[in-house]
Image: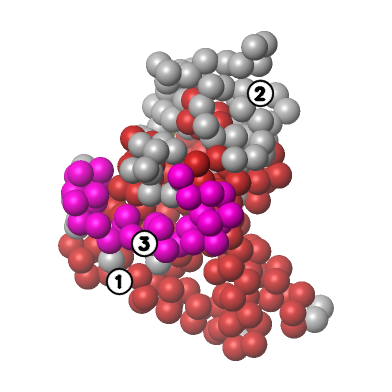
Amino acid sequence: MGTVLLAVLIGVGVTTLANVCTTVYLHRGLSHRAVAFSRPAHVGFKTLVWLTTGIKVREWVAVHRKHHAHTDTPDDPHSPAVSGWFTVQLRNLQMYRRAAHDRANVEKYAKDLAPTVWDRWLFDRSWLGLLIGTATLVVAFGWQVGLLAAFVHVNYYLAGSAAINAIGHHFGRRPYANSATNLQWLALITAGEGLHNNHHAAPTSAKLAHRWYEIDLGWFVIKPLTWMRLAKVRLTELRLAATSRSTQHA
């Protein structure tokens, strides 16, 4: 197998792992409390998020909760309705960093996630997590494959995250009355996040697929974790937000 092809496959694999951790742990678990994790699962997910993305948990949760509190208004950290979908796609990281580095946002929207000693000494050092993650790839696969795989991963992860906020609030189906959209192809490459209209309709649901033909890869991870008692789903039934209604027959 050629160096480039191997690096691409590894990069896609690392991004898939990062996407699963993002949607299952950061999004459904911490941001919306739709899933509770056992201590080993919590530590495992947090470590993998740190190694694959360098994300500071409190910052990500705060930005996402603010997005839900002010969806597609001028106070939304990354709204295509305000800035245009193409601008959000290109500048999503910059928009995220602006909101994430606003201490007032973090204190307001993530006050339930007080920093721990481990956060202060380890997990809040984003550069260290990314350095260790990249070094692991280099040691495991050699410097050429490792660095190229890291390059593929970073670009794939950032592009997919941006697409959820940009394309996922502009193009696609809206079975529920909210400004987000459903795109199955986007859901397949982001572990379920592309079913974004469903999520905004029922943000406390751990399962983003609401219909038999929808595929939510994140749920395929959550369900086995519940069988092993590493996770517990808060709601077993679909509970729509008060402002949501189906438009299927409208």
Is any atom of residue 12 visible in this view? Answer: yes
Q: Between residues 29 and 59, which one lies in front from this camera angle? A: 59
Magenta residues?
Answer: 82-111
| Residue 205 appears left or right of 121 | right
Specify how the rendered protein is coloured. secondary structure
Snapshot quadrant of residue 38: top left
The x and y percentages for residue 204 are 41, 28
- Classify the position of the N terminus by image quarter: bottom right
Outermost residue toward the right in this view: 1
**Any magenta on residue 109?**
yes
Amino acid carrying mark 3 in the image? Arg
Give the residue at x 63% y 71%. Answer: 152
Tell me where residue 137 appears, x and y as whole percent. Answer: 56, 78
**Residue holding disc 1:** 125
Earlier in the chain: of badge 1 and badge 3, it is: 3
In the image, what residue occupies the spot 76% across and 75% down?
A: 5
Q: CA distance from mark 1 to mark 2?
A: 40 Å
- Residue nearest the observer in this picture, 95 or 145: 95
For the residue pair 77 and 118, the one nearer the viewer reads as: 77
Q: Which mark is residue 211?
A: 2
Residue behind mark 3 = 97
The structure residue drawn at horizontal position 25% and vertical position 46%, both measured from the top left corner, is 110
What crowding class fits label 1: few (fewer than 14 Cα within 10 Å), some (14-19), or many (20 or more)? some
Give above or below for 235 relative to 2. above
Q: Residue at x 37, y 75 (%)?
A: 127
Dominant SS in magenta: helix
Q: Is residue 40 visible?
A: no
Q: Based on the displayed image, in which of its 4 quarters is residue 123 positioned? A: bottom left
Looking at the image, tell me whether mark 1 or mark 2 is earlier in sequence order: 1
Which kind of residue does numbered mark 1 sit on?
Answer: Arg
Residue 104 to residue 4: above or below: above
Amino acid type at circle 2 is Arg
